[in-house]
Structure formats: C-alpha cells, structure tokens
Amino acid sequence: MVVVKNICCIGAGYVGGPTCAVIAYKCHDIKVTIVDINPERIAAWNSSKLPIYEPGLDEIVFERRGKNLFFSTDVDATIQEADLIFVSVNTPTKKTGLGAGMAADLAYIESATRRIAEVATSPKIVVEKSTVPCRTAQSMRTILEANSTNEIHFDILSNPEFLAEGTAIKDLLSPDRVLIGALQTKEGLAAQEALVNVYTNWVPKERVITTNLWSSELTKLAANALLAQRISSINALSAICEATGADVDEVAYACGLDSRLGPKFLKASVGFGGSCFQKDILNLVYLSHQLNLPEVADYWKQVVTMNEYQKKRFVRTIISTLFNTITNKKIAVLGFAFKKDTGDTRESAAITLIKDFIDERAQVAIYDPKVSSEQIFMDLCEPGVVDTRKQVEKQIQICSSAYEAAKDADAVVIVTEWDEFRDDQLDYERIYKNMHKPAFLFDGRLLVDAAKLRKIGFKVNVIGKNE
Ligand code: NAD
Ligand code: UGA
C-alpha cells in the first residue's frame, strides 16, 4: 500500500492554497508544500496578510504554517521530495490561436507537467486538481511516460475541486463529495487508494467517490455547467416575471419546494460571475464541437448567452428608468466582487455594468468592502492602453463606504450581495437624505426589502419583480 507522506501543490491560488492548507490542517503527519512561480504570491502566503480573502482561511494557515505547511518558490526541490503532486495551476480561456475565446489554455498544465517529468528522481502520483477538458490526463500521461524509467514511475489521478469561493473552508472541511478518478489498472487503483486515504482522515468514506479518469474530468465540467444552467434558467424566468407581474422570489421558492428540484441555486441575479462558470461551459462547448456534436454545443452555449443578456438587460432597465440618459449622472455601485465574502473580481457582473455606465458617460462611484482600488482600475481599463486609464479615472470614484458612494448620487445599484448592504445593516434613510431626488435604487441581488425602502422615498427596481 502506498502511503502519502509528502505533498507538493503546484499553484498557490484560490484552489491550491485553501485546499492544501486544509490537508495540512487535517493530516499533521503529512508535509505539505505549496509552490508557485509568482514570488509575490508566495511572499504574501508567508506574511500576515494572505493573498486571498476567504473566511476561516487565516486561522488554518497560521496554525499549520511552519509546522507541516510551507509556501515556497523552489518548485524543483519540492517536486523532488514529494510522493504526491497536485497540479493546481490556472486554466483560463484561450485568448488567441486555435479555439480562442472558448478552449481552455492548457499551457500552464503542460509546463507544470513537463517540470515534474524533468526534475523527478523518484516515483510520483500526479494529481490533476485544475479544471481541464476531458482527456487532458491522457496528454499529461504521455508527457510523463515519455520520461519515466524503471525507477521513476508516474501515476496520474483526476481529483477536481468543487469548493466555492467565500465558503471554501467550509466546503473543504465538509465536502458534499470528493471525487477521485484513476486509470483502471493495478497501479492506477493503488494510487487512487493512496489519495482516498489522505481524504478519509476527515471526510466520511462514503463521500469519497472513485471513478475512472474520464468520468472524473467530465464530472467537474458537468457540475459547473448544471449549476450555471440553473442560474440562467431562473434569470430567464426573471425577465418573464418583470413582464407579467409574477415575483421571481415566489416562483423560485415554490419551484424549489419540489424535492426533485431543490431550493439551492435559484436566486435570480444580475448574472453569474467568477473565474469558472463561463470558462468551463465554453470549454464544454468547445469539446462538443470537437466531438462533432453541434446541437450539444449550442445547448450549453445558451447558458452563457442568457447570462450576457441578463447583464445587458439590467443596464437597459437602469438607463430607461433614469429617463433614458445617465450622462453626467452619478451612479453608486455597491459591490464589485463577483459574490459576497470574496475579494475576487474575475468575470464579475460589476465589470460589464460599470463599463457600460462609463460608455454612457455617467460618473460612477464604487464601494466594495474587500476589493482594492488597484484591482478595480485593472478590471476596468484595457491592459496597456494609457488613454483608457485616464478616461476611467475621470469617470470613476472609488469610495470607502456605501454612504460616500451614494452621496449626491442619482441612483444606487446593488451588484454584490454583501450582508452589509442589507436594509437592516445599512442606514438607507441616511443614504436617501444625501441623494439627488428622485432617488433610484436598483437591486440586482434581491437583497433589500423594497417596500421598506419605498416608504423612505426611494424609487426601487428589483430584478425579477414588477411592483
Ligand atoms: P489562480 O490563478 O488563483 O492560481 C493559479 C496559480 O498557479 C497562480 O498563482 C500561478 O502563478 C500558478 N502557476 C501557473 N503555472 C505554474 C507553474 N508552471 N508552476 C508553478 N505555479 C504555476 O487559479 P485558481 O482560481 O486557483 O484555479 C486553479 C484551477 O482550479 C483552475 O483550473 C480552476 O478552473 C480550478 N478551480 C477553481 C476554483 C475557484 O473557486 N477559483 C474552484 C474549483 C476549481
Ligand atoms: C462555483 C461552483 O459553485 C463551485 O462548486 C466550483 O468549484 C467553482 O465554481 C469553480 O469551479 O470555480 P464560485 O464561482 O466560487 O463556485 O461561486 P458560486 O457560489 O457558484 O457563484 C457563482 C456566481 O453565481 C456568483 O456570481 C453568484 O453570485 C452567482 N449565483 C449563485 C447566482 O446568481 N444565483 C445563485 O442562486 C447562485
């Protein structure tokens, strides 16, 4: 039986960092080292201010760091001493070349795999943690096998990650399931068992699912596609609600009580964001095209199309409600992260909305409790174009509170569902008093009690409602 004693994780990002910190926290006899080619990121992991905000993460890292949890830029040495290596690097959508705008860019996966093949001096279990197109393990295996000798043997596993940002630690400590795919060979099954034994240190055995490699890879894409599909479905219904007088919260609640449907992931919104839903669906669309399944590709593509429509629809509602022009009007945007409890802004709906407001020549005041000003500028400017930065600087103001953002504003737009924007936490009377009148409020997250705010005097517009 193979016993894992030394783990290397390549990629100290939103997945590699929390996932391997939790392994170190739960398995004191395993040495876990997380490596990255980005020295600033590693320095931050070794500092008192970690590079990502995630509730509960600090406590876990600070407890195990320097004991059995390490962060390093020494990729080669860490690979050499490990018996199991997680590959947890980024797999963004390709920007150029074949499959641009759709296929996953596997350059980081390949370079990490080649590094393992080049420097390994003993057998390794290599685990795909990143989200990848189905059959990527085959390419990794080919690269590794081309470099294996009698003494150095590589086994490859797929162990996709299902954590959601903002609840990563909770999800990792108590996952719905852990999925481990392996080649159905004697060695593959032994490697699978070794990783199962790591997780069963804290995850009940019945929640650790074992499958073949390809089912595991495809399940990750499928799970994200199904989750995003539910959001696009409720968002499509939100448009019908607004046109008919049905209330999307009531519809979602009544549908969700059907035990076959369930209540989760039916919250209408200004559109889903995050680094993965769109990327992984496009990945599935690309895969379907490659497999000559155009109808399947079109089916999944529609989930992304609907999401884009929802964001644009919300902008159109705002503009038409503000008498068809927002030029020189002040719009206060509450929230910039793609969801609450994270500082991550990747694919956040806020970016699309604010770019549209800027195009309409509005003045935009932004407040988010966890996103830095520099990040907001980076997201709103075209990289390398000096003029856009100047223009963006003229039109946006980054604020340190919701009150500052809403001062003298014509409209407040709730984009991220941070708890502090709820009507029992924020003093909406104070906000109303300091706004231009009529004072409009657009709730893209079904967060506030519209009736209560209307009593204060706001003109309230809520996604999926027409009151
Ligand atoms: P990330 O961009 O935050 O982190 C990836 C890290 O890998 C970066 O710090 C980068 O510098 C490093 N890296 C790239 N190539 C490297 C190499 N050759 N050697 C060493 N380090 C290297 O990405 P992430 O959000 O952690 O996502 C990682 C993967 O996990 C992606 O495939 C993503 O789809 C998947 N995933 C993400 C989430 C999430 O919530 N973010 C959840 C589940 C799955
Ligand atoms: C999502 C999945 O939930 C994770 O299981 C998966 O591991 C991860 O993607 C990934 O592969 O990266 P994440 O994107 O972090 O996690 O966050 P979610 O909670 O799924 O939210 C995604 C987006 O959908 C957010 O913008 C959120 O506000 C939005 N959303 C979510 C809705 O609009 N309505 C809902 O009912 C739920």
Image: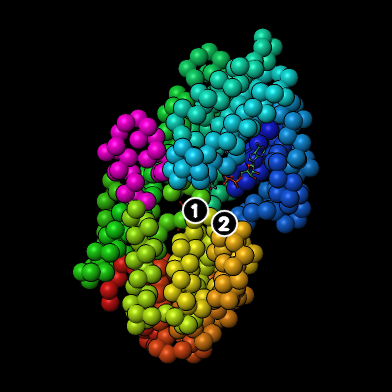
Question: Residue under circle 2?
Answer: 344
> Image quarter for residue 172?
top right
**Residue 161, relative to residue 342: is it above or below?**
above
**Residue 51, relative to residue 198: is it above or below?**
below
Q: Which residues are magenta?
A: 281-304
Q: Which type of secondary structure does the marked residue at label 1 adopt?
A: loop
> Image quarter for residue 37?
top right
Is residue 178 something that shows in the picture? no
Q: Residue furthest left?
A: 244
Residue labelled 2 has its Cβ within 8 Å of some atom of ligand 1: yes
Q: Residue furthest right?
A: 66
Q: Position of residue 444 (x, y in %)?
A: 40, 68
Q: Residue at x 62, y 41 (%)?
A: 16
Q: Which type of secondary structure does the marked residue at label 2 adopt?
A: loop
Q: Is residue 316 left or right of residue 203?
A: left
Classify 10 Å Cα crowding around label 2: few (below 14), some (14-19), many (20 and above): many
Badges 2 and 1: C-beta atoms under 8 Å apart? Answer: yes
Q: Position of residue 216 (x, y in %)?
A: 45, 30
Q: Is residue 223 left or right of residue 125?
A: left
Question: Residue under circle 1?
Answer: 274
Q: Nearer the viewer, residue 160 or 116?
A: 116
Does the magenta segment cover residue 339?
no
Q: Is residue 69 left or right of residue 423?
A: right
Identified by mark 2, the residue type is Asp
Quadrant occupied by the C terminus: bottom left
Quadrant occupied by the N terminus: top right
